[in-house]
Protein backbone atom coordinates (compact mmCIF):
# COMPACT_ATOMS: atom_id res chain seq x y z
CA UNK A 1 0.00 0.00 0.00
CA UNK A 2 2.16 2.90 -1.23
CA UNK A 3 1.86 6.22 0.59
CA UNK A 4 0.70 9.40 -1.08
CA UNK A 5 -1.15 12.52 0.02
CA UNK A 6 -3.67 12.70 -2.80
CA UNK A 7 -7.23 13.06 -1.50
CA UNK A 8 -8.88 9.67 -1.01
CA UNK A 9 -12.61 9.07 -0.57
CA UNK A 10 -13.47 6.21 1.80
CA UNK A 11 -17.22 5.51 1.84
CA UNK A 12 -18.45 4.08 5.13
CA UNK A 13 -20.55 0.98 4.54
CA UNK A 14 -22.42 1.77 7.73
CA UNK A 15 -24.69 3.76 5.38
CA UNK A 16 -25.03 0.92 2.84
CA UNK A 17 -27.92 -1.50 2.44
CA UNK A 18 -27.26 -4.08 5.17
CA UNK A 19 -29.07 -6.74 3.16
CA UNK A 20 -26.75 -6.38 0.16
CA UNK A 21 -23.25 -5.52 1.36
CA UNK A 22 -21.42 -7.42 -1.35
CA UNK A 23 -23.04 -5.56 -4.23
CA UNK A 24 -22.90 -2.27 -2.34
CA UNK A 25 -19.13 -2.60 -1.94
CA UNK A 26 -18.73 -3.50 -5.60
CA UNK A 27 -20.89 -0.53 -6.57
CA UNK A 28 -18.98 2.11 -4.60
CA UNK A 29 -15.65 0.82 -5.90
CA UNK A 30 -16.93 0.87 -9.47
CA UNK A 31 -18.15 4.43 -8.88
CA UNK A 32 -14.76 5.71 -7.74
CA UNK A 33 -14.23 4.91 -4.05
CA UNK A 34 -10.52 4.79 -3.15
CA UNK A 35 -10.93 2.90 0.14
CA UNK A 36 -13.78 1.05 1.82
CA UNK A 37 -14.32 2.13 5.43
CA UNK A 38 -15.75 -0.36 7.92
CA UNK A 39 -17.00 0.97 11.27
CA UNK A 40 -16.81 -1.63 14.04
CA UNK A 41 -18.79 -0.74 17.18
CA UNK A 42 -19.27 -2.75 20.35
CA UNK A 43 -22.23 -1.18 22.17
CA UNK A 44 -19.83 -0.42 25.04
CA UNK A 45 -17.17 2.06 23.91
CA UNK A 46 -19.84 3.64 21.68
CA UNK A 47 -23.65 3.32 21.87
CA UNK A 48 -24.10 1.13 18.81
CA UNK A 49 -23.31 -2.43 17.73
CA UNK A 50 -22.10 -3.34 14.24
CA UNK A 51 -19.64 -5.78 12.67
CA UNK A 52 -17.59 -8.58 14.18
CA UNK A 53 -14.65 -10.30 12.49
CA UNK A 54 -16.79 -12.84 10.56
CA UNK A 55 -18.76 -10.01 8.91
CA UNK A 56 -15.59 -8.13 8.03
CA UNK A 57 -14.11 -11.31 6.56
CA UNK A 58 -17.22 -11.65 4.41
CA UNK A 59 -16.84 -8.04 3.22
CA UNK A 60 -13.20 -8.68 2.30
CA UNK A 61 -14.22 -11.05 -0.49
CA UNK A 62 -15.81 -8.09 -2.29
CA UNK A 63 -13.28 -5.35 -1.47
CA UNK A 64 -10.64 -4.90 -4.17
CA UNK A 65 -9.31 -1.59 -2.81
CA UNK A 66 -7.98 -0.79 0.67
CA UNK A 67 -10.17 -2.06 3.51
CA UNK A 68 -9.96 0.52 6.27
CA UNK A 69 -11.32 -0.93 9.53
CA UNK A 70 -12.11 1.51 12.34
CA UNK A 71 -12.46 -0.13 15.75
CA UNK A 72 -14.75 1.78 18.09
CA UNK A 73 -14.38 -0.90 20.73
CA UNK A 74 -12.72 -1.41 24.10
CA UNK A 75 -10.60 -3.35 24.77
CA UNK A 76 -8.89 -3.55 21.38
CA UNK A 77 -5.88 -5.83 21.82
CA UNK A 78 -7.75 -9.16 22.14
CA UNK A 79 -9.32 -8.63 18.70
CA UNK A 80 -6.32 -7.47 16.65
CA UNK A 81 -5.46 -10.90 15.28
CA UNK A 82 -9.09 -11.61 14.40
CA UNK A 83 -9.39 -8.46 12.30
CA UNK A 84 -6.02 -9.19 10.68
CA UNK A 85 -7.32 -12.64 9.76
CA UNK A 86 -10.49 -10.98 8.44
CA UNK A 87 -8.36 -9.06 5.93
CA UNK A 88 -8.10 -5.51 7.23
CA UNK A 89 -5.42 -3.46 5.47
CA UNK A 90 -5.58 -0.65 8.02
CA UNK A 91 -6.75 -1.16 11.59
CA UNK A 92 -7.51 1.94 13.65
CA UNK A 93 -7.97 1.96 17.41
CA UNK A 94 -9.10 4.85 19.57
CA UNK A 95 -6.58 6.53 21.82
CA UNK A 96 -9.35 6.68 24.44
CA UNK A 97 -10.05 2.93 24.30
CA UNK A 98 -7.23 1.79 26.56
CA UNK A 99 -4.17 2.80 28.59
CA UNK A 100 -1.50 1.15 26.40
CA UNK A 101 -1.73 2.68 22.94
CA UNK A 102 1.95 1.99 22.19
CA UNK A 103 1.35 -1.72 22.70
CA UNK A 104 -1.80 -1.64 20.59
CA UNK A 105 -0.12 0.08 17.64
CA UNK A 106 2.87 -2.27 17.85
CA UNK A 107 0.51 -5.27 17.84
CA UNK A 108 -1.42 -3.96 14.82
CA UNK A 109 1.78 -3.51 12.83
CA UNK A 110 3.07 -6.85 14.09
CA UNK A 111 -0.04 -8.52 12.66
CA UNK A 112 0.83 -7.15 9.22
CA UNK A 113 -1.55 -4.19 9.02
CA UNK A 114 -1.12 -0.43 8.87
CA UNK A 115 -1.78 1.08 12.29
CA UNK A 116 -4.23 3.91 12.86
CA UNK A 117 -5.07 5.91 15.96
CA UNK A 118 -8.39 7.76 16.29
CA UNK A 119 -9.09 10.86 18.36
CA UNK A 120 -12.52 11.75 19.70
CA UNK A 121 -13.60 15.40 19.37
CA UNK A 122 -12.62 16.16 22.97
CA UNK A 123 -9.09 14.73 22.67
CA UNK A 124 -6.39 17.26 21.72
CA UNK A 125 -3.93 16.75 18.87
CA UNK A 126 -0.99 16.79 21.26
CA UNK A 127 -2.18 13.54 22.87
CA UNK A 128 -0.99 11.57 19.87
CA UNK A 129 2.49 13.13 19.65
CA UNK A 130 4.28 10.30 21.55
CA UNK A 131 2.75 7.75 19.15
CA UNK A 132 3.64 9.30 15.80
CA UNK A 133 6.52 6.96 14.98
CA UNK A 134 4.22 3.96 15.44
CA UNK A 135 1.34 5.40 13.45
CA UNK A 136 0.39 5.20 9.77
CA UNK A 137 -2.94 7.06 10.03
CA UNK A 138 -4.60 9.48 12.43
CA UNK A 139 -8.39 9.49 12.31
CA UNK A 140 -9.90 12.77 13.49
CA UNK A 141 -13.49 12.30 14.59
CA UNK A 142 -15.62 15.25 13.51
CA UNK A 143 -18.66 13.77 15.23
CA UNK A 144 -18.96 11.91 18.50
CA UNK A 145 -18.52 8.27 17.47
CA UNK A 146 -21.38 5.80 17.45
CA UNK A 147 -23.85 6.77 14.74
CA UNK A 148 -23.82 7.92 11.13
CA UNK A 149 -25.55 11.03 9.84
CA UNK A 150 -24.45 13.40 12.62
CA UNK A 151 -23.70 17.09 12.19
CA UNK A 152 -20.07 18.00 11.44
CA UNK A 153 -18.01 19.39 14.32
CA UNK A 154 -15.31 21.85 13.23
CA UNK A 155 -11.94 20.27 14.09
CA UNK A 156 -9.87 22.26 11.59
CA UNK A 157 -7.61 23.70 14.30
CA UNK A 158 -6.86 20.15 15.51
CA UNK A 159 -6.13 19.02 11.94
CA UNK A 160 -3.70 21.89 11.41
CA UNK A 161 -1.97 21.05 14.70
CA UNK A 162 -1.64 17.40 13.64
CA UNK A 163 -0.29 18.38 10.24
CA UNK A 164 2.40 20.41 12.02
CA UNK A 165 3.23 17.59 14.46
CA UNK A 166 3.47 15.00 11.68
CA UNK A 167 6.00 16.98 9.65
CA UNK A 168 7.41 14.79 6.87
CA UNK A 169 6.34 11.47 8.40
CA UNK A 170 4.27 9.27 6.04
CA UNK A 171 1.07 9.51 8.09
CA UNK A 172 -2.41 9.99 6.67
CA UNK A 173 -4.89 12.33 8.35
CA UNK A 174 -8.36 10.86 8.01
CA UNK A 175 -11.60 12.69 8.76
CA UNK A 176 -14.63 10.74 9.95
CA UNK A 177 -18.00 12.38 10.45
CA UNK A 178 -20.18 14.82 8.57
CA UNK A 179 -18.02 14.91 5.45
CA UNK A 180 -19.80 16.31 2.36
CA UNK A 181 -18.94 18.76 -0.45
CA UNK A 182 -19.30 21.67 1.98
CA UNK A 183 -17.07 20.36 4.77
CA UNK A 184 -14.51 18.48 2.64
CA UNK A 185 -12.66 21.63 1.49
CA UNK A 186 -12.34 22.85 5.08
CA UNK A 187 -10.60 19.71 6.33
CA UNK A 188 -8.42 19.25 3.24
CA UNK A 189 -7.22 22.84 3.44
CA UNK A 190 -6.26 22.15 7.06
CA UNK A 191 -4.19 19.10 6.08
CA UNK A 192 -6.44 16.03 5.77
CA UNK A 193 -6.07 13.59 2.89
CA UNK A 194 -8.55 10.73 3.61
CA UNK A 195 -12.26 11.55 3.79
CA UNK A 196 -14.74 9.07 5.24
CA UNK A 197 -18.28 9.72 4.04
CA UNK A 198 -21.37 7.64 4.66
CA UNK A 199 -24.75 9.20 3.97
CA UNK A 200 -23.15 11.81 1.70
CA UNK A 201 -22.02 9.01 -0.64
CA UNK A 202 -24.97 6.63 -0.46
CA UNK A 203 -27.69 9.29 -0.59
CA UNK A 204 -29.98 8.96 -3.59
CA UNK A 205 -28.56 5.72 -4.99
CA UNK A 206 -28.85 1.96 -4.67
CA UNK A 207 -27.13 -1.15 -5.98
CA UNK A 208 -29.62 -1.12 -8.84
CA UNK A 209 -29.02 2.59 -9.50
CA UNK A 210 -25.42 3.26 -8.42
CA UNK A 211 -24.80 6.32 -10.59
CA UNK A 212 -25.68 8.71 -7.72
CA UNK A 213 -22.88 7.10 -5.66
CA UNK A 214 -20.41 8.17 -8.33
CA UNK A 215 -21.92 11.65 -8.56
CA UNK A 216 -21.67 12.04 -4.80
CA UNK A 217 -18.08 10.77 -4.66
CA UNK A 218 -17.04 13.11 -7.47
CA UNK A 219 -18.73 16.07 -5.81
CA UNK A 220 -16.81 15.46 -2.57
CA UNK A 221 -13.53 14.85 -4.41
CA UNK A 222 -13.89 17.92 -6.64
CA UNK A 223 -14.68 20.15 -3.66
CA UNK A 224 -11.75 18.71 -1.69
CA UNK A 225 -9.26 18.98 -4.55
CA UNK A 226 -10.20 22.61 -5.07
CA UNK A 227 -8.89 23.27 -1.55
CA UNK A 228 -5.84 21.00 -1.70
Image (cartoon, rainbow, N blue to C red):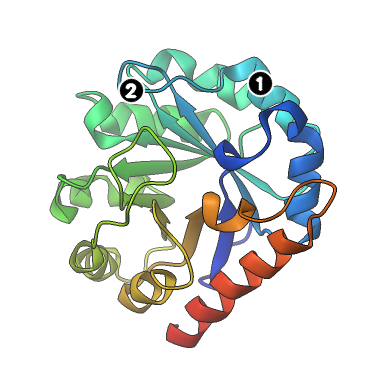
Which corner quadrant holds the N terminus? bottom right
Which corner quadrant holds the C terminus? bottom left
Front residue of 49 and 136: 49
Residue 32 shows in the view = no
Compared with 200, 68 (above or below) is above
In the displayed structure image, the side of residue 203 where residue 101 appears, left or right: left
Label 1: which residue?
A: 55
In the displayed structure image, the side of residue 62 where residue 56 appears, left or right: left
Q: Name the secondary structure under disc 2.
A: loop
Label 2: which residue?
A: 47
List x then y, in percent, for residue 136.
44, 51
List x then y, in percent, for residue 84.
60, 26
Q: Name the secondary structure under disc 1.
A: helix
Compared with 55, 66 (above or below) is below
Q: Measure the alpha-carbon separation of dots 1 and 2.
A: 19 Å
In the displayed structure image, the side of residue 6 where residue 154 appears, left or right: left
How busy is the neighbourhood of tag 1: few (under 14 within 10 Å), some, or many (20 plus)?
few
Front residue of 222 and 99: 222
List x then y, in percent, for residue 155.
23, 61
Residue 127 shows in the view = yes
Outermost residue toward the right in this view: 208
Outermost residue toward the top in this view: 78
What residue is at 43 percent from the left and 46 percent from the top?
149
Which of marks 2 and 1 precedes in the sequence? 2
How busy is the neighbourhood of tag 2: few (under 14 within 10 Å), some, or many (20 plus)?
few
Amino acid sequence: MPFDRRVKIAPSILSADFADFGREIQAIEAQGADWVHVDVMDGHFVPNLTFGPPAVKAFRRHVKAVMDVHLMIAPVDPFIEAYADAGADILTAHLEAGPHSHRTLQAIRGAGMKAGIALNPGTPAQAVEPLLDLTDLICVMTVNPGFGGQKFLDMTAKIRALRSLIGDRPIHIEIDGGVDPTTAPLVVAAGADVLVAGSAVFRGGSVDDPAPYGQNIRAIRDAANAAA
